[in-house]
Amino acid sequence: METKPYLIALDLDGTLLKDDKTISEDTLRTIRKVKEAGHYVCISTGRPYRSSSMYYQQMGLTTPIVNFNGAFVHHPQDESWGRYHTSLPLEVVKQLVDISETYSVHNVLAEVIDDVYFHYHDERLIDAFNMNTTNVTVGDLRDNLGEDVTSVLIHAKEEDVPDIRAYLSDVHAEVIDHRRWAAPWHVIEIIKSGMNKAVGLKKISDYYQIPAERIIAFGDEDNDLEMLAFAGCGVAMENGIDSVKQIADTTTFSNEEDGVSRFLKQHFSL
């Protein structure tokens, strides 16, 4: 009997990746078996492509990928699949820089797919973000940006994060969605409103003609909520936040305990 293919969507940080940002050998073996059984495995992450491509290659994926929480979806191996890039208007980005200066934030970053723009010079942040890219520009974003951007990150003082987010909700709710990163970074991440991982995952599932009941999605943070709700089977990590566990259909072991691998082994009787 031929089994119908599933689509398995993997968040990276806190989900597929262990805390040291590696994929365990056990998980790699399981992913390989799932693919050999005819199922599709894809990555759905808040990260840009440049800092998720190494995991894509390590797992030997041949699927489209969701980056920037859905604001950029493309197929690394098939140009003809299309590039879905939903960007923030440049005028809005300049207003975000203005408000950030009001709060004397540590830094503001703008990302245009894989090009990174820093408002202020910042060795530590540049090291953290400069993965697989040489296209880093430092200086006033209002001068340096010449096009709409994929995402803006505001690295603020911890005590200012709630105020800045309240301002964003009041003034820019129509245009942007914002999320807070997990500690230790007090970062507010901003993308075009209406963008989330479910939007990206739907493009991929439509392409493979896989219905929701055959989609399994794994996640741990608030940027995974829509994706877990969209999937027929949303799986929360044990280390995930409460709201993710509440929306998920089930909870698996933590990212440190091969939660993704253990769930897939059981589900597909591997």
Image (spheres, helix red, strand yellow):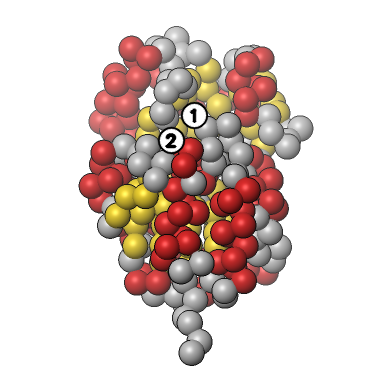
**Residue at (69%, 33%) from the top-left corner?**
131
Q: Which residue is mark 2?
A: 190
Residue 60: name its quadrant.
bottom right
Q: How many numbered dots are placed on residues in this image?
A: 2
- In this rendered view, identify the residue nearer to me: 8 or 23: 23
The structure residue drawn at horizontal position 57% and vertical position 75%, both measured from the top left corner, is: 38
Image quarter for residue 183? top left
Q: Amino acid at mark 1?
A: Leu
Give residue 127's position: percent from left, percent from top. 67, 22
Q: Residues within 10 Å of mark 1 (few under 14, many from 20)?
A: many
Residue placed at 42% from the left, 52% from the top?
A: 218
- Is 203 located above or below residue 50 in the figure? below
Mark 2 vs mark 1, CA separation in Å: 6 Å
Label 2, secondary structure: give it.
Answer: strand
Q: Dot 2, crowdedness within 10 Å: few (<14), some or many (≥20)?
A: many
Figure check: 33 above or below 70: below
Left or right, 3 with respect to 50, comes to left
Residue 162 can be seen in this image: yes
- Contact check, label 2 and label 1, Cβ < 8 Å: yes
Q: Which residue is mark 1?
A: 153
Secondary structure beneath label 1: strand
What x and y, as percent, mark residue 43? 54, 54
Q: Say whether residue 247 is left or right of residue 258.
A: left
Residue positioned 69% across, 46% down in the render: 54
Residue 37 placed where, x, y %?
A: 57, 74
At label 2, the amino acid type is: Ile
Q: Position of residue 205 (x, y in %)?
A: 47, 69
| Residue 196 makes an appearance in the image | no
**Which residue is more in the foreground, 264 or 6?**
264
Question: Which residue is situated farthest in the left direction here?
Answer: 246
164 up-or-down from 58: above or below = above
